[in-house]
């Protein structure tokens, strides 16, 4: 029988060890040169070293590419270097923030904080006393309430702009439309402090973000899908519900994430309309309600002792962890079904 | 002139289908190699129009169309007899796709669109005031140029999506699913992967999935807007087979730029042309006649490849 020898699968486009070695030697050379440069000049220090390193290594790679290949490849390498720089400059602040919060906040974390509130304690008490259960509950209730209010209004506003394309859709940007609906609902009833009022206030901030993002996401849905839905005998509403919104699902989750990111750290509006309570309150319709940003704000500003600062950083760490959990959950939900 | 032409073709078609059947079958068995578009057209198997499901077909009376102030289609009167396949041919921009979209009221989906004239389905004007447009689109299905399965649905859900969109209750969905995919020539390829997403299929399979999807709501008429223009020859062949199969139970109108395709699949052919102004129908006749002895010089020039 005639047998074909099957070659082993290869990836010829990947970097070879030889190329890696040459890149590594260039970076090593760049580090060496930068070190010498900052010692000889007055640029000593971390920042000086890193900037010199960037300039030197970019130059070295540029020269290497020019010698190995041509001018176009050299220019290409220049762009890659700057893209990498941009990425690093974006990541550094994020990593730095998370690092700072974790380092300063872990001292303020203890199990008791998740089962106690601050009704019997002041922020200057030992960290082991009191907790932020009331703030966590308040944040969950108010952000959840804001989401329940904002998501339908925001998505309906976006649908009005993209699907119905009514007469109002040209002069009115989504931001104004969402705010108008909300302010006409909220202002007549703002009389007492409560968690629900906090939700309404947060919605004012959340709706524009959700409406704007959903609008962009719905515009990405190809027109052919709308035509296909309508051509199958669907009404516009059923086409939107059965075809357009499911197709835009991951985009709508992004809208929720951005909307929550916008509001979850808000302090001022909550202080005004929900009062900022220190005791556990599950009832959003009456009584002051705490929130994590308020808890942090209060510990920072009204305390002054090390205990209060540790408490604030601990609260910040919990807020950060809470945001990560929410975003991870949202991504998980949007990615679970579908593509 | 046009009225008369279409009338003749309609009678001719019904007769042809009975007379020619045996002759054509014989011809197909002997595998005569077609030498021209006309002989390709003559080589087609004729069909018997008729069962009740088909209705009496689709007729248009003086259809005009505009986009904004631009007059893109002028005075088209054309009949689509039940159980026939009609090909609309002509160069780009001649209004044939626009005409197709007036037949199931998809034309009005474009905000600036306007139209005049009548489109009669079973003798009733689909543009009459008070007509439920969703019912019209249920009866006159459509397959688009680019395959567009719904991305959020599996293959099975895609086929049955019409039932959901039009809120039709059916208990025998499993049988319906199989029969639609069978008729679209896709069942054997996807029967084990009905829960995969439509996007996992090849372009030709996706287009057949879209055909299966439009069959699930049992339309009398199926409009196809260049259904094979994005597909390779093999998939095109499969879809043409599907069209021939479907034409036994429904009326089909197909827009195509491929004249071999028009010759292979259609019973009648209508030639559209725009001389800078609005597009108009130049000639409509049985397909073999259009490709062998067209009346109009411009039709002859187009089908023989002298322009367009």
Image (cartoon, coloured by chain):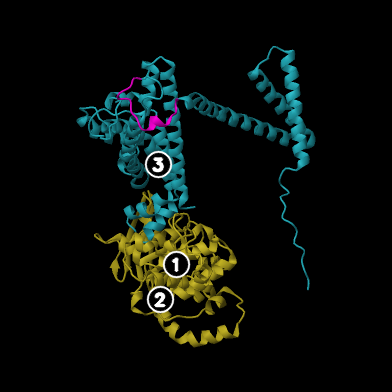
Chain colours: A cyan, B yellow
Q: Secondary structure at mark 2?
A: loop
Q: Secondary structure at mark 1?
A: helix
Alpha-carbon span between mark 1 and mark 3:
32 Å
Q: Which mark is residue B261?
A: none
Dot 2 corresponds to which residue? Answer: B249
Foreground residue, A166 or B4? A166
Disc assigned to residue B212: 1
Residue A178 left/right relative to A47: left
Name which quarter of the figure residue A262 lies in. top left
Point out which mark residue A214 bears: 3
Q: Nearer the viewer, residue B51 or B21?
A: B51
Res A283 seen here: yes
Q: Secondary structure at mark 3?
A: helix
Asked if residue B53 lies left or right of residue A284, the reply is: right
- Tell me how far mark 2 sits from mark 3, CA to CA: 43 Å
User: Which residue is rendered at x = 48% and y = 27% of the image?
Assistant: A106
The chain that hosts pointer 1 is B
The mark closer to the camera, 2 or 3, is 3
The answer to whether the residues at label 2 and label 3 have Cβ atoms under 8 Å apart is no
Callouts 2 and 3 on one subunit: no
Please, is residue B254 above or below residue A249 in the view? below
| Magenta stretch, residue numbers | A108-122
Dominant SS of magenta comes to loop
Q: Quadrant of the N terminus of chain A?
A: bottom right
> B139 above or below A27?
below
Q: What is the crowding at mark 1: few (fewer than 14 residues within 10 Å), some, or many (at least 20)?
A: many
**Would you identify the image quadrant in which residue A253 lies?**
top left
Q: Chain of mark 2?
A: B
- In the image, B8: left or right of A93? left
Earlier in the chain: of badge 1 and badge 2, it is 1
Q: Residue at x 32, y 34 (%)?
A: A142
């Amino acid at each position: 029988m005639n047998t074909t020898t099957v070659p082993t699968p290869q990836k010829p486009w990947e970097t070879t060890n030889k190329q890696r070695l040459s890149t590594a030697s260039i970076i090593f050379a760049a580090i060496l040169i930068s070190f010498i440069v900052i010692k000889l000049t007055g640029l000593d220090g971390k920042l000086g070293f890193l900037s010199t390193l960037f300039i030197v290594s970019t130059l070295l790679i540029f020269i290497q590419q020019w010698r190995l290949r041509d001018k176009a490849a050299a220019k290409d390498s220049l762009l890659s270097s700057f893209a990498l720089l941009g990425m690093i400059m974006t990541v550094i602040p994020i990593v730095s923030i998370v690092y700072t919060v974790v380092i300063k906040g872990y001292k303020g974390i203890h199990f008791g904080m998740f089962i106690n509130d601050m009704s019997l304690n002041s922020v200057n008490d030992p960290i082991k006393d009191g907790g932020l259960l009331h703030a966590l509950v308040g944040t969950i209730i108010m952000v959840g309430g804001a989401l329940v209010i904002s998501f339908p209004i925001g998505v309906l506003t976006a649908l009005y702009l993209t699907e119905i394309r009514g007469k109002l859709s040209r002069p009115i940007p989504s931001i104004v439309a969402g705010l108008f609906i909300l302010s006409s609902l909220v202002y007549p009833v703002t009389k007492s402090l409560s968690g629900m009022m906090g939700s309404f206030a947060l919605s004012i901030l959340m709706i524009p973000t959700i409406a704007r993002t959903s609008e962009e996401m719905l515009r990405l849905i190809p027109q052919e899908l709308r035509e296909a839905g309508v051509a199958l005998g669907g009404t516009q509403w059923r086409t939107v519900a059965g075809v357009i919104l499911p197709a835009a699902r991951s985009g709508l989750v992004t809208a929720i994430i951005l909307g929550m990111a916008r509001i979850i750290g808000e302090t001022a509006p909550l202080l005004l309309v929900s009062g900022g309570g220190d005791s556990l309150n599950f009832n959003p319709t009456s009584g002051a309600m705490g929130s994590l940003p308020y808890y942090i704000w209060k510990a920072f500003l009204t305390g002054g002792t090390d205990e209060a600062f540790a408490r604030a950083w601990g609260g910040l760490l919990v807020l950060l962890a809470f945001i990560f959990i929410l975003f991870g959950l949202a991504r998980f939900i949007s990615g679970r079904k579908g593509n | 002139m046009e009225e008369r032409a279409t009338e003749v073709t309609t009678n001719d078609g019904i007769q042809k289908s009975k007379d020619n059947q045996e002759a054509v079958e014989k011809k197909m068995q002997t595998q005569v190699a077609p030498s021209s578009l006309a002989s390709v057209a003559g080589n087609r198997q004729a069909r018997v129009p008729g069962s009740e499901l088909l209705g009496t077909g689709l007729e248009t009376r003086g259809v005009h169309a505009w986009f904004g102030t631009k007059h893109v289609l002028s005075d088209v009167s054309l009949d689509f007899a039940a159980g026939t396949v009609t090909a609309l041919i002509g160069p780009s921009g001649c209004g044939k796709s626009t005409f197709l979209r007036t037949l199931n009221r998809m034309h009005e989906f474009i905000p600036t669109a306007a139209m005049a004239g009548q489109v009669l389905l079973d003798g009733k004007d689909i543009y009459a005031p008070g007509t439920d447009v969703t019912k019209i689109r249920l009866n006159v299905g459509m397959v688009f140029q680019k395959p567009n399965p719904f991305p959020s649905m599996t293959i099975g859900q895609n086929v049955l999506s019409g039932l959901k969109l039009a809120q039709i209750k059916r208990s025998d969905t499993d049988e319906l699913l199989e029969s639609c995919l069978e008729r679209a020539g896709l069942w054997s390829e996807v029967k084990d992967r009905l829960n995969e997403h439509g996007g996992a299929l090849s372009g030709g399979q996706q287009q057949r999935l879209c055909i299966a999807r439009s069959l699930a709501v049992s339309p009398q008429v199926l409009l196809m807007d260049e259904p094979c223009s994005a597909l390779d020859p093999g998939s095109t062949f499969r879809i043409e087979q599907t069209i021939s199969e479907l034409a036994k139970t429904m009326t089909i109108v197909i827009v195509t730029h491929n004249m071999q395709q028009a010759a292979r699949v259609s019973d009648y052919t209508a030639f559209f042309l725009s001389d800078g102004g609005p597009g108009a129908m130049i000639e409509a006749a049985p397909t073999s006649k259009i490709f062998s002895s067209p009346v109009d010089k411009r039709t002859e020039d187009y089908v023989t490849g002298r322009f367009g």
